[in-house]
């Protein structure tokens, strides 16, 4: 009798164990994956932008999955992030996107750059891929309603900060140096528009190849024109540093604005004394301040060395909130249809690291696909980056 009871207990335990394992396996099988493709420059001159973007996506999608994923009409989902190095080359971006779509089954994407996502737009639209791109406004087109720009475009940077430079530095004339591609030309067009609104004269507008290291010939002409301010437009992070260094070596003593977010530590290390008093756009705040920034920093140091959190990390790790916002849009509309999600996303607003975030741009682009948020400006003083101001986008420029 005792042996029978013992056998009965063993059978019950085994049955319960199999039941639990079966339910767990069923739960795992019932959770579907949605693949998100992250295309960025993980090597080359633009990698100081691309690596933080890739890491931010990892942090953001992990956060959503750790919190249980999301539900659409009773079906549970989680995210699968697949990343690719497009080396900041448009043709490489297109190849990587095709691999993401046709081999890895991606249905959402992020493509870093200007010319890179622009080259990808036809394939993104053809395959109904909603893309949220750390890009330039060049990707915002009414005929491509599935493509968003979640960078605060250079139009917003110029609109927010040119009035500051006029008031604080007495700037009346500007010279721009941009990379020679669609993104660079879009930056020059944006500068012409915003400078015109503010009554600033552009006395030089130069283009260089994206991998240029020696800017002496261009800067010799620019410095001779004696602009009050030299700005670097959509030049790569490394190019920004070299322009600052070489301009000072040629005797330029005016205002330097490294417009599109080069890394503070890189600027100080590479430019040395030439970095003093240079302004950096899209930086800071230098230390995590808000609960959003503190949570981002906490998650960062759980995965990566704390020493790699730089002065512009709060800005370039902005993509960490992207998965949360995209997930919220999907849950709000209860659909995975790209156009339905896009229509929902364009009318949302949320709190980001710099304050209120929302998509706008109807006045300028005819469609709300441009991220609007305050722009942070820092300046290098005594080998340190010092916060200067947060400037919102003036009303009436984009909407």
Image (tube, rainbow, N blue to C red):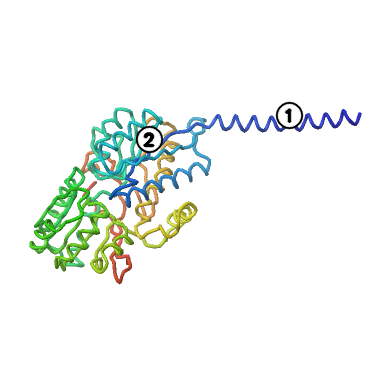
Snapshot quadrant of residue 39: top left
Residue 14 vertical position relative to residue 262 in the rendered view, above or below: above
Q: Residues within 10 Å of mark 2 (few under 14, many from 20)?
A: many
Q: Nearer the viewer, residue 88 or 31?
A: 88
Q: Earlier in the sequence, mark 1 or mark 2?
A: 1
Q: Secondary structure at mark 2?
A: strand
- Please identify the residue farthest to the right as the structure is shown: 1
Q: Is residue 143 above or below residue 308?
A: above
Please identify the quarter of the rendering in which residue 17 is found: top right
Is 72 left or right of 1, judged from the image as shown?
A: left
Expressed as whole percent of the image width and height from the top left, the position of residue 110 reads 34, 40
**Which residue is at 42% across, 43% downward?**
323
Q: Disc 1 vs disc 2: Cβ atoms closer than 8 Å?
A: no
User: Which residue matches tag 1?
Assistant: 15
Q: Would you say 225 lies left or right of 64 here?
A: left
Q: Which residue is drawn at the image coordinates 50% and 31% (left, top)?
A: 32
Q: Residues within 10 Å of mark 1 (few under 14, many from 20)?
A: few
Is 5 on the left-hand or right-hand side of 351? right
Residue lying at the far front of the rendered structure: 214
Between the residue at mark 1 and the residue at mark 2, the CA separation in whole angstroms equals: 42 Å
Residue 332 image offset from top left, x and y in percent: 43, 37
Residue under circle 2? Answer: 108
Residue 54: image x %, image y %?
A: 38, 46
Rendered image: mark on residue 395: none
- Between 109 and 141, the one lying in front of the other is 109
Which is nearer the eye, 3 or 166? 3
Pinpoint residue 121: horizontal percent, then vertical percent: 27, 34
């Amino acid at each position: 009798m005792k042996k029978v009871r013992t056998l009965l207990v063993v059978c019950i335990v085994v049955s319960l164990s199999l039941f639990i394992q079966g339910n767990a396996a069923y739960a795992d099988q019932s959770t579907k994956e949605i693949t998100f493709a992250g295309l960025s420059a993980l090597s080359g001159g633009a990698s100081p932008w691309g690596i933080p973007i890739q890491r931010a996506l990892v942090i953001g999608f992990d956060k959503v999955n750790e919190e249980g994923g999301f539900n659409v009409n009773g079906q549970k989902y989680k995210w699968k992030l697949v990343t690719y190095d497009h080396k900041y080359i448009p043709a490489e971006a297109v190849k990587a996107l095709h691999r993401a779509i046709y081999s890895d089954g991606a249905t959402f994407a992020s493509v870093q750059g200007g010319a890179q996502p622009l080259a990808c737009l036809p394939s993104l639209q053809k395959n109904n891929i909603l893309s949220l791109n750390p890009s330039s406004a060049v990707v915002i087109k009414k005929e491509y309603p599935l493509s968003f720009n979640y960078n605060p475009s250079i139009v917003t940077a110029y609109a927010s900060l040119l009035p500051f430079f006029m008031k604080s530095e007495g700037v009346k004339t500007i010279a721009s140096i941009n990379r020679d591609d669609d993104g660079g030309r879009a930056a020059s067009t944006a500068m012409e528009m915003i400078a015109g609104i503010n009554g600033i004269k552009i006395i030089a507008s130069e283009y260089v190849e994206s991998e240029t290291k020696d800017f002496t010939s261009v800067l010799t002409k620019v410095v001779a024109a004696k602009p009050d301010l030299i700005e670097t437009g959509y030049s790569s992070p490394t190019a920004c540093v070299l322009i600052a260094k070489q301009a000072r070596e040629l005797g330029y003593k005016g205002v330097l604005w490294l417009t599109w977010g080069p890394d503070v530590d890189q600027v100080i290390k590479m430019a040395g004394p030439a970095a003093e008093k240079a302004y950096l756009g899209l930086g800071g705040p230098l230390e995590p301040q808000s609960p959003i920034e503190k949570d981002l920093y906490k998650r960062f140091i759980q995965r990566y060395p704390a020493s790699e959190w730089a002065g512009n990390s709060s800005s370039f790790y902005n993509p960490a909130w992207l998965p949360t916002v995209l997930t919220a849009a999907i849950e709000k509309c209860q659909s995975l249809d790209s156009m339905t999600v896009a229509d929902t996303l364009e009318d949302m607003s949320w709190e980001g690291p710099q304050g209120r975030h929302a998509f706008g741009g109807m006045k300028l682009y005819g469609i709300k696909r441009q991220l609007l948020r305050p722009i942070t400006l820092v300046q290098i003083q005594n080998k340190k980056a010092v916060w200067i101001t947060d400037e919102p986008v003036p009303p009436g420029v984009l909407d």
